[in-house]
Image (cartoon, coloured by chain):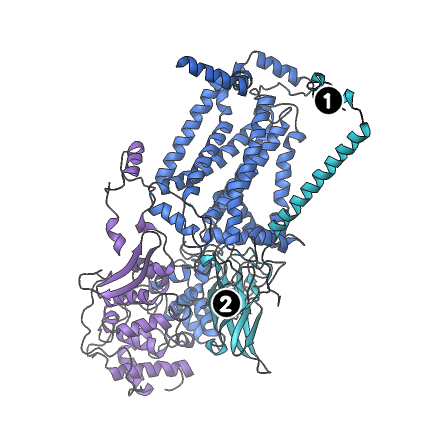
Amino acid sequence: MSHGQRVSHCCRPGTPLWLLAAALFFTGCEPPGRPNQADRPLRPDQVMSFDRLYGTRCAGCHGAEGNLGAAPPLNDPLFRAAVGEEELAEIIRSGRPGTLMPRFGGEPPVLTDAQIKLLVFEIKGVPYRVRSQFDEITGPSDFSVEVAADGQPPQWGTVSKRPDDMPSLTPSSAESGDAKRGLQVFAQACAKCHGERGEGGKDDGPGAINNQAFLALISDQALRRLIITGRPDLGMPDYAGKTGRPDDFKPLTAADVADLVALLASWRETGANAQP
Amino acid sequence: MTDINDPTSRRGDVSAQVANPSRRWFFRWLTYLMGAAATLVLAVPLIGYLVSYRRQRPPWIKLGAVTDFPQNVTRMITFDNPLKQPWDGMVAHTGVYVRYLGADDRQQDQFLVLAVNCTHLGCPVEWFEGSGLFMCPCHGGVYYENGEHASGPPPRGLYHYVWRVRDGQLEVQAPHFPTLHDTLRDRA
Amino acid sequence: MFAWLRTAARWLDHRIGISTDIVPVMKHPVPRQLEGPMGWWYVFGSASLTLFLVQILTGILLALVYVPSADEAYETLLYMNYVQPLGWYIRALHYYAGSGMMVMVLVHMTQVFLQGAYKYPRELTWVVGVFLLLCTLGMFFTGQILRWDPDAYWGLAVGGSMVGRVPGAGPELVSIMLGGPIIGADTLSRFFALHVFIIPGLLILLLSLHLWLVVKQGVSEPPVPGQQVDPQTYDAHYEGELRRGVPFWGEALLRDAFFSAVVVIAVALFAAYMGPKGPDLPPDPTLQGANPRPEWPFLWLFALLSLSPPPAETFIILVLPVILILGLLLVPFVSNRGERAPSRRPVAVLSVIVIYTTLGVLTYEGITSPWSPHMTAWSGDPVPVSMVKQSTPLQLQGAVVFQSKNCRNCHALDGVGGRRGPDLSTVGTRLTRDQLIDQVSNGTPGGGYMPAYGKQVNPAEMTALVDFLVSLRPPGHPPAYNPAEQPSPRSVEPGTDGEATANRP
């Protein structure tokens, strides 16, 4: 932003008048009360700092640092590597149907397209630059956000490459899971912590996931995402993680994931105690 | 009669020389009367000017086609209030919460059109889609999605705009600033 | 040359009467004690006057740039802040000198009240002073409007809504106040005229009367315990004081001048260090996130209106101010004789303490405004990590429900979030599952502060939310237990809360 460069200058030339006044009253040379363009009040649509955008719109559910929040972490290496930029933008714009993730675009928009783009670049770990017009009186306007290798480095660092064997976050249309097979996958991949039928493990375990209220509040898509990326911030392994899994555990395939989702979906409909 | 050339009349005892008391009396009361008339002539238009403004029949404002409003979704629609002055600038921007309620039994489209002004002290209420509540930032008044008072200090529910559907368009009557004794009633 | 000047001076003096009429007034005798340490009590009135002069000066300077037009006012303020050299400083001076004037007027009044200086024969001086206080408050309110940002716009909305409560004439008064049917250009012009012509004109008029009365009735002598004011004898007594008095033009004036200088320097420093107040965002009433706050002299009223029961509000808005003003006006008539020394007037001292404590507490409440929901808390204040870590999947969903249903806007977790409702960090130790379901579904009974969420959450959301809330307990604490409730708490074991709900029908 064009006003970024004018902050720390002391005693700029061309303003002898206030310099004189300042010299009269102060030992320093910039009166602290002088309004600074960098601190000007911004309309919600003029806010282009990731800290402020994320801190007011996302942190409540996704956690202050993008993890250890109530909702699935955004600052998650696998998620950041695998999610598509357009897909991410669409989730922010329209929310996730079937979950409590609200929309931030739409009518009237909560976030502008440029702000959504900024969030996407930050989450995807793409260095970017914010361009804007700047007027001394009315402040910044006409924002655009573009990829720039030498631009703003993303706060959560860059993203490593998506592992080759990682199932896609979005199910391919041909896939349809089989709940019965899902139960076998479940026994191998999940049961140790979540219990044989998802009823929850021992005292310090992660708790039940066969709960109909829980399943009613989470969509198949969100389940799929959690199965693939896990919740490393809470100790849940990802699709390939070995923690708490048998020694011969093999990374889950796309089909495995689809079967697991189908199993959980069937629990949502009929409860965990009915046969899948 | 006083003679202005008479040196004694310049300083001193004028009243002693009144020649025609009834004429004096008349002149005094005439002055009172004239003064009162002058005051009135001035005051009436001055006060009239002070308390009056351009009163006009509130025009109708198109908010959009009925089909543009998804059912049971509350949205803020903004428009420039036509009751503004040409030099009003952005202050004339007006927000209104619109919710399409679907068609009733007689196939008439029904809308909920609510003012943003809290009925407590006029602050702008904000709509929260997640909880389906309007909340006021000033004193914490809360309203349900149908505009009814839910909690907090407001004495009543949100003000309803006067609206109609014409040629498939939702229209509202240009709103004045609504207050407790002066809600948005039909003024057409 | 000098002879010519002297002639000119004599001519002027003869025509105006400086040496015969004005100099004696400046040299009028004041009680001798004003030269002693007690004299420092008498400096606050002149400090108010000095700051008023600063206000006139800076006000005129601001008027050179400010455009009182609804579509340009805001930009001219930004122009002063960022472009016009020293524009920001004049704006800051005007704000802090105004605040200082408000403070000085209050201190001056308090001093006059505590030392009984309003008693015979200075009742009218006090009455005029009360109107000067009202003018100062009026300047503060109208001045905030000229800042023409959302605070100004919504301040007008609040003012209009208050006026609109007047029975009968309300709507008519609102349109007179706004200058039209809506808050707009005419409103700004009206408040500009009030701030720049009407109230200052009135203020100058009243101030002249106030000063005339000060000269006419004389400055009160410092109170002496045991010395009673009696209208029968006071005049003779005061005359005696003056015979032993000293001229105002001298030590007394020097003190006034010294203190005024201190105050002006303090204001200048404040202005330079704090900078101008606002303007905040543009005055667009459709901007989301507006959070209107009144200026500091009105915060107590803001708090009073929030804390009072709704049925009493119209009374507080319309009648209470009249009672307060009448009370102030009646002070010198209720007690215009007797003791003046604060040490002999416990009721006066006590009422000052009570009034300032009340105002102070209300102002503090007004600053923190715990009754206001935090509008972005639901999406901005993270669920505390410790709660996330101990949660089951269902409880995590409950936490998301808690956030997305905006509970956080009014309820804090670990002290972060809204403060309208109680902090819920340990609610699981206070309320049982059924009590929580009842509280969430029905809100505060009888239209209190919590809305009924019964229709705002679906059964799954309710289950998850309540499961989360029940889990909010310090480690090792058992859940709340209500003996009247079925089933007994033994069926709910810690750590398996989720399961217990899951298997409910």
Residue placed under numbered mark 2 in the picture: B97
Q: Nearer the viewer, residue C203 or C11?
A: C11
* As drawn, C226 above or below C334: above
Please tell me whether mark 1 sits on a helix, a strand or a loop.
loop
Q: For the point 25% across and 53% down, which residue is it? A: A4
Asked whether residue C298 appears in the rendered view, the answer is no
What is the x, y in percent for residue A107?
Answer: 42, 70
Q: Nearer the viewer, mark 1 or mark 2?
A: 1
**Residue A17 position by quadrant:** top left
Tell which of A236 and C213 is nearer to you. Answer: C213
Q: Residue at x 36, y 35 (%)?
A: C269
The chain assigned the colour purple in the figure is A
The disc labelled 1 sits on which kind of residue? Answer: Asp
Task: Measure the alpha-carbon separation of dots 1 and 2.
Answer: 81 Å
The amino acid marked with disc number 2 is Tyr
Query: Which mark, by number, is residue A22?
Result: none
Task: Name the image quarter holding the N terminus of chain A.
Answer: bottom left
The x and y percentages for residue A249 are 21, 78
Same chain shared by disc 1 and disc 2: yes
Residue C390: x and y, percent?
35, 64
Q: Residue furthest front?
A: B5
Q: Which chain is blue?
A: C
Q: Who's cyan, chain-wise?
A: B
Chain designation of label 1: B
Quadrant of residue C121 within the rendered picture: top right
Which subunit holds the residue at mark 2? B
The label on residue B3 is 1
